């Protein structure tokens, strides 16, 4: 099954970038906004500064299960392996002009080993 549109391609690039250990290469817009159970962070650099240590402590791998995409948006369901086990995640990825402008993440953060929420 091929990638249907740019939003799906960007959603997959989001996961692939984290798996490759290259968060600085993620296709995020400068005004990127990320919302999750841990809060909302606005701005590409602020987000990356906040999430790098969280990801290093919480994420051992990400595995894409399925994507659904429409014009300018994609839902991506993936499994996040953590030191405490598997966490199911679904991200709603919004895109514009070849960049990810917003992601809303849905997951249960209860068992994450590290949950810094000072955003």
Image: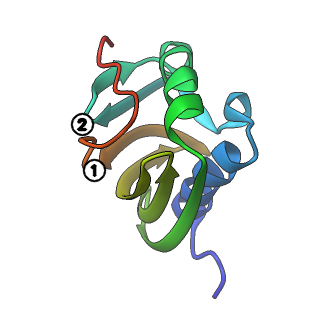
Q: What residue sits 40% from the left and 34% below the top?
A: 113
Disc on the earlier residue, 1 or 2 = 2
> Can residue 30 be seen in this snapshot?
no
Residue 98 lies in quadrant: top right
Q: Which mark is residue 41?
A: none
Q: What residue sits 29% from the left and 24% below the top?
A: 40
Secondary structure of the residue carrying numbered label 2: loop
Q: What residue sits 48% from the left and 17% below the top?
A: 50
Residue 4 lies in quadrant: bottom right
The x and y percentages for residue 108 are: 24, 49
Q: Is residue 4 above or below residue 61?
A: below
> Can residue 18 be seen in this snapshot?
yes
| Residue farthest along the bottom direction in this orientation | 1
The x and y percentages for residue 67 are: 46, 71
Q: How packed is label 2: few (under 14 Cα within 10 Å), some, or many (20 or more)?
A: some
Q: In the picture, which quadrant includes the C terminus? A: top left
What kind of colouring is applied to the model shown? rainbow
Front residue of this view, candidates 89 and 27: 89
Mark 2 sits on what residue?
37
Secondary structure of the residue carrying numbered label 1: strand
Mark 1 sits on what residue?
106
Q: Are marks 1 and 2 in contact (CB under 8 Å)?
A: yes
The x and y percentages for residue 8 are: 54, 64
Front residue of this view, candidates 48 and 74: 48
Q: What residue sits 67% from the left and 33% below the top?
A: 23
**Mark 1 vs mark 2, CA separation in Å:** 7 Å
Q: In the picture, which quadrant includes the N terminus? A: bottom right
């Amino acid at each position: 099954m091929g990638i249907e549109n740019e939003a799906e391609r960007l959603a997959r690039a989001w996961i692939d970038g984290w798996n490759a250990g290259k968060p600085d290469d993620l296709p995020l817009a400068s005004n990127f906004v990320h919302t999750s159970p841990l809060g909302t962070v606005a701005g590409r650099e602020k987000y990356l500064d906040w999430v790098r240590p969280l990801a290093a402590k919480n994420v051992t791998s990400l595995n894409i299960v399925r994507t659904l995409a429409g014009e300018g948006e994609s839902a991506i369901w993936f499994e996040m392996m953590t030191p405490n086990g598997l966490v199911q995640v679904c991200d709603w990825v919004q895109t514009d002009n070849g960049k990810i402008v917003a992601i809303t993440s849905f997951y249960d953060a209860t068992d994450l080993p590290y949950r810094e929420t000072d955003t």
